[in-house]
Image (cartoon, rainbow, N blue to C red):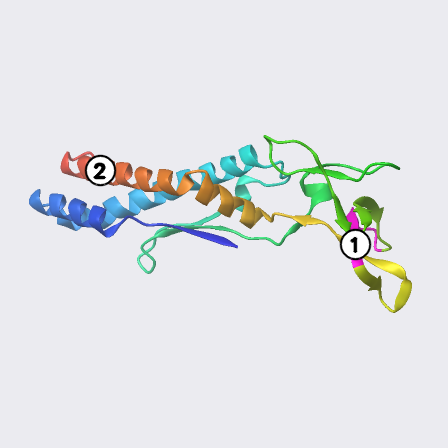
Amino acid sequence: MIIVSAQPHSAAIDAIEKRLAEMGKESRMNDVVKKAINETAAKGKKELWKGVKKRYTLEGFTAGDVRKRGYSARNPAAVLTVRGPALGILKNYRTTPNDIENAAMLQVFKVGAMKALAIHNAGSFYKAFLAKMKSGHEGIFQRVPGKQMGNNPRKQAIKEILSLSKSKAAEMVYEKNGVYVAMQEEMVLRLHKHMNAVIGGAE
């Protein structure tokens, strides 16, 4: 789970509060902060979603997966939340199934190439493969070196290959793709916009 809080730095709050007080508008401070926070969070929600779609081949990630809780008197901040477990790659990422000679392949990043899903262990080569379980669940699996299935030593255990969850993908975009910095810059712009509107009588 990733939780992003949209809240201005104390230095920005102090500067806005001082300016409003100088103009006799200190009573409007809460309005300015509330609007700035909620607008920044709304833009951050959109940018986080767009960033994930641009960076990853992750399917089924919608704007609704980024949930926004707005500013309130009890919680003077807006919060963006993305939840979800690790995902099977077959239905969630760009893949190609295996054939007789080649392992199944996966492409996680939009700007990147398909990579074969295979491992070498103790002289053996384990290729990922498409399989359908008795439950009807279909996925891409890989044999687990040195591990048997249940109590049967003749059957090798397998596990489904998982990749980034929606929340982890959003976290990576937030931290690595500049969304954090962009939100802080947006917050300052919004604070000054609404402060000036209050001072000028437009709000």
Horizontal side of residue 133 vs 181, given as left or right: right
Closest to the observer, 65 or 151: 151
Q: Is residue 104 left or right of residue 113?
A: right
Closer to the chain start, of discs 1 and 2, is 1
Residue lying at 72% horizontally and 49% vertically, measured from the top left: 161
- The foreground one among 83 and 38 is 83
Tell me the kind of residue under disc 2.
His
In-image side of 127 versus 80 (left or right): right
Q: Nearer the viewer, mark 1 or mark 2?
A: 1
Give the number of the disc on residue 142.
Answer: none
Which quarter of the rendered picture does the C terminus lie within?
A: top left
| Mark 1, residue position | 122
Looking at the picture, how far across and down is residue 101, in whole percent?
A: 86, 36
Q: Residue at x 26, y 47 (%)?
A: 33
Q: Which mark is residue 192?
A: 2
Provide residue 186's location: percent of width, then percent of height: 32, 37
- Which class describes the residues within 10 Å of circle 1: few (<14), some (14-19), or many (20+)? few
Q: Which residue in the rendered view is the most extreme toward the bottom?
A: 151
Residue lying at 67% horizontally and 42% vertically, measured from the top left: 92
Residues in magenta?
135-145
* Label 1 – label 2 distance at C-alpha: 63 Å
